[in-house]
Image (cartoon, rainbow, N blue to C red):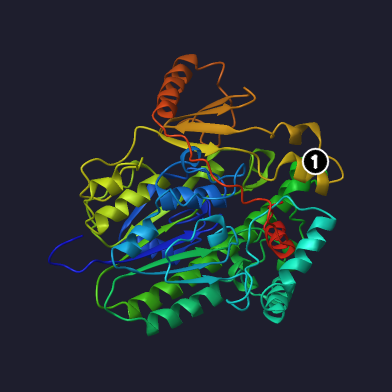
Amino acid sequence: MRENEPDPNIVLIVMDTARYDFVGKTERNVTPNLADIASRGTSFQNAFAAAPWTLPSHASIFTGVHPSEHGAHAGNKYLDPSVPTFPAILHQCGYTTMGASNNAWINDQFGIIREFDKFFKGWKLIQRGEDFGKAGLTNEGRDRLRKAVKTTLSGNPVVNFLNGLYHQTRSRFRSDNGAARANKWIRKQLQSYSRDDPVFLFVNYLEPHLEYDPPERFVTEFLPSGVSYDKAVNVPQNPWEYINGSLSLPEDELDCLKALYAGEIRYLDHRIGELRRTINETLTERDTIFIITSDHGENIGDHGLMDHQYCLYDTLVHTPLIVEGGGFSTGANPDELVQHTDIFPTILDLIGEEDASVKENLRGNSFHPNAEESGHDFVVSEYMAPQPSMEALTERLSGVNDRMRTFDRSLRAIRTKTHKLIRASDSNDEFYDIRNDPRESENRFAKDRETVIELDRELNQWKRSRAMAPEVRDQNADVDRQTEEILEELGYL
């Protein structure tokens, strides 16, 4: 720990599903509050997620290692307790640890939440009682009914019923995806906590996750000419039907969805500004460092896809990363290549943690301005298994076409500032010249063989240097119906 000066408060904000090109200083000017924070700190232009969806991406943020190492992904939806997380280390270092999440994947029942003094679960009306955020995607038909009854009747049935009713009705009456309620809870906690210890606050905001339904006043300026808010929100938003070809969305309707998505991010920017004011009003005893990122991006018709599955294109893995405080207003290099696995070692630098045993298993580099080694020659992203699985999609859709079945594979991508190689388990590999083709529209795998071979060599060496994920217990079998409904609403089957 640092000597002669108090440890800083640390605030980590994850904007669930916010893609890089909609955040910060963009042509759309979607995020004025984030632009202001970035102007006072560093906005990294080349930051990348280790995975394209919530569970493995958050696990990589918290552990500093990739999905193939920490083992939490679609093939095994649980983070083993043997893998250290930085919130737990902060707790052990004397931090008061608080968290708030509106995404049910960020849950102690997935092994993600550890040693938080207080944690707010936005999918619950009443924080006590049975936790319906348990992940599980294997129950179907009668098994679901039995699980729903069993879960509701366990513990306090009245509280469980109210939590279930809240989930069933909140989407019909809410004006957001939980950001306002989370901010209210955070303000209450910060106003009442003991001022003796530094605070670590983690927040997962569910905006702008599907379904896109921002308050009207936040989306008006982004709507295409002549399109009303009511018309835009009535555009179908079923990603699996779209990918499967049973839902056709012409370009003008995709433009409506992009406008709604921008409105979601503008609304979230408003709530982040609100949170920042709360923190500046309440955490006045010591410096506060803000780290703001997203767990992954989003496809809105890009590459013929919707939602955030089945690919490792930049639309999903290129993420915003903004840091304010802790020396980031000067000295940091905004153009260096960084990744979510770098957040863990950066936080250790911010608190002055020098214990070699804490750092020895970390794969990332600190991007703190005073770090001895920062940035990367390349970054790696992994998609260990399809989510939803083909079996789940077959169960829910009238039929799964041949194109959809091509996504039944795993992916691993290596990316430099200029090129990307995507290796697929079905050998349908891809290579893109990012400098001249930032939208990744021309697969040059068969054309640029020299660079492909070079990146493939780097990727194979990277794999050989990794430790295999620990053997973890299967958490997928014990599933409750309400959790499945929560995750189905988010697009996870």
410 up-or-down from 139: above or below: above
Q: Using the image as rendered, state which of residue 107 and residue 21 is in the foreground.
A: 107
Q: Secondary structure at mark 1?
A: loop
Q: Along the horizontal axis of the image, is 158 left or right of 381?
A: right
Label 1 packing within 10 angstroms: few (<14), some (14-19), many (20+): some
Classify residue 37 by image quadrant.
bottom left
Residue at 54% from the left image edge and 58% from the top image edge: 16
Identify which residue is drawn at 45% across, 15% down. Answer: 450
Residue 366 visible in the shown view: no
Please tell me which residue lies in front, 151 or 363: 151
Q: Quadrant of the N terminus?
A: bottom left
Q: Write down the residue under mark 1.
A: 245
Q: Which residue is more in the foreground, 86 or 242?
A: 86
Position of residue 460 measured from the top left corner of the image (x, y, whole percent): 45, 23
Where does residue 413 sit, x and y in percent of width and height?
51, 32
Give me the residue at 45% from left, 76% from top: 186
